[in-house]
Image (cartoon, rainbow, N blue to C red):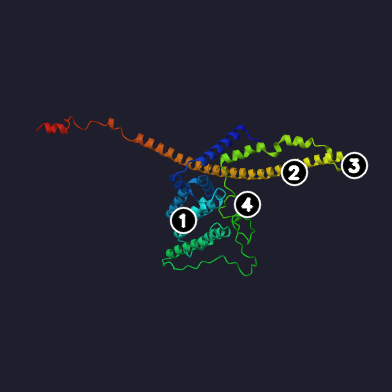
Amino acid sequence: MIKTTEDRNLENNSLLWMFIEMMAGFTEGALAKKLADLNSSQQSIQTLSLWLIHHRKHHATIVKVWFRELQKAKDHRKLTFMYLANDVIQNSKKKGPEFGQEFGNVLRKAFENMAVPESDEKTRKSIERILQIWEERSVYDPKLIKEFRRGLAEGGSQREGSPPKKKVKVVENVRPETDKTPTKRVAVGRSRSPIRERKKSETEVEIEVDGMKELHVTLSPRTPAGDPPEPEELIKALMDLENSASSDALVREKIASLPPEVSEIGLLSKLEDKASAEKLSVQVNEAVHLLTDYNSRLASEMEYRKKLTTMLKDFLQAQKDLLAQAEHRLEEYTEKLQKVYVVRQEVKSHIQNLPDLTQLPDVTGGLAPLPSAGDLFSMH
């Protein structure tokens, strides 16, 4: 399908608006509004997560507002807040540990605040899945995860109306005896194999963190494989390709000018004396060095381009998410505008039906006006 000029203009405008959305300034009020609009859909959680990671320098304020709004949220929305926290914690690791550390300071109280009763088995299983992933991924220390579970259990006990127990038995993720595969704990930065069958709502993607591969377990709603790069970072990565090995015409010219004797073993029979052999030996060694170095540069360039492809993919996905959000907002505010139009028309009609007081007859009957306060005082 050939894109028309109008299609390209619309596409460029959409990308521009998505870029503006990503660059939007951070304020507590803006975050509180976004958390109020947050829903349990993949798009909503993923888009807000990308925005928070982009503004990661405000991590302390972000976590403070997140916890405050979690406490005020209705029960059915609190699990969505936890999904958002999970998404931000896991996908911000490439940028730094700030979010993980900051969330770790409030999660104990956050789980207790959720106050999930024992009878709500579905929500408890969803929360336990988050904790299990953090445990398997070594996102948090096992002792801290036990504290999270205690907070969840104590909050549920208080919700049921019974006093919290002094000691809460924390049930670890024990595998059935029939499953002989040992449980594995995998540190961040190491790859791991699936140790059990995943639910349909879960996927696993392999991402690279600080040069080491990591298997990222994604909950439903799905979290992205990686957070998008900064625009400046992406531009620099693209510009660095100008100095890539495949663009080095000088080295390719040197390789092309190598004598055929260095690569054709059949030509060795033409060597007639030791001097010619030693000269060829020097040329072969130089060719080996030249080709080894160039091949190494080409291999590095290939890995670099793979990483750049991932960066572009993540950036494009972020722009698509922001586009979807912008389209949703446009639809929402277009509907509001139509309602305002209706109200304006009704107000206009109402004004036309109101009587004009200037046209009413004089009902004073020619009586003199009442004296003013000044007149009353002057009479004395």
Hey, which residue is sitting farthest bottom in the picture?
177
Separation (CA) of disc 4 from disc 1: 29 Å
Q: Judging from the image, what secondary structure is the residue with disc 1 in?
A: loop
Q: Identify which residue is drawn at 43% across, 63% down.
A: 159
- Mark 4, residue position: 212
Q: Earlier in the sequence, mark 3 or mark 2?
A: 3
Q: Earlier in the sequence, mark 4 or mark 1?
A: 1
Q: Amino acid at mark 3?
A: Ser
Q: Earlier in the sequence, mark 3 or mark 1?
A: 1
In the image, residue 146 lies at what x, y percent? 51, 63
Q: Is residue 167 above or below residue 350?
A: below
Depth order, front residue of 143/358: 143
Hey, which residue is sitting farthest front in the picture?
275
Q: Judging from the image, what secondary structure is the residue with disc 4 in?
A: strand
**Could you tell me if the residues under marks 1 and 2 are in contact, i.e. CB atoms within 8 Å?**
no
Q: Circle 4: is it few (<14), some (14-19), or many (20+) Cα within 10 Å?
A: few
In the image, residue 254 lies at what x, y percent? 76, 35
- Mark 2, residue position: 292
Separation (CA) of disc 2 from disc 4: 25 Å
- Mark 3, residue position: 269
Q: Is residue 178 above or below residue 23?
A: below
Q: Identify which residue is drawn at 77% across, 43% down.
A: 288
Q: Amino acid at mark 4?
A: Met
Q: Identify which residue is drawn at 49% across, 46% down.
A: 57
Separation (CA) of disc 3 from disc 2: 26 Å
Depth order, front residue of 65/12: 65
- Mark 1, residue position: 106
Q: Earlier in the sequence, mark 2 or mark 4?
A: 4
Q: Is residue 180 above or below residue 373?
A: below
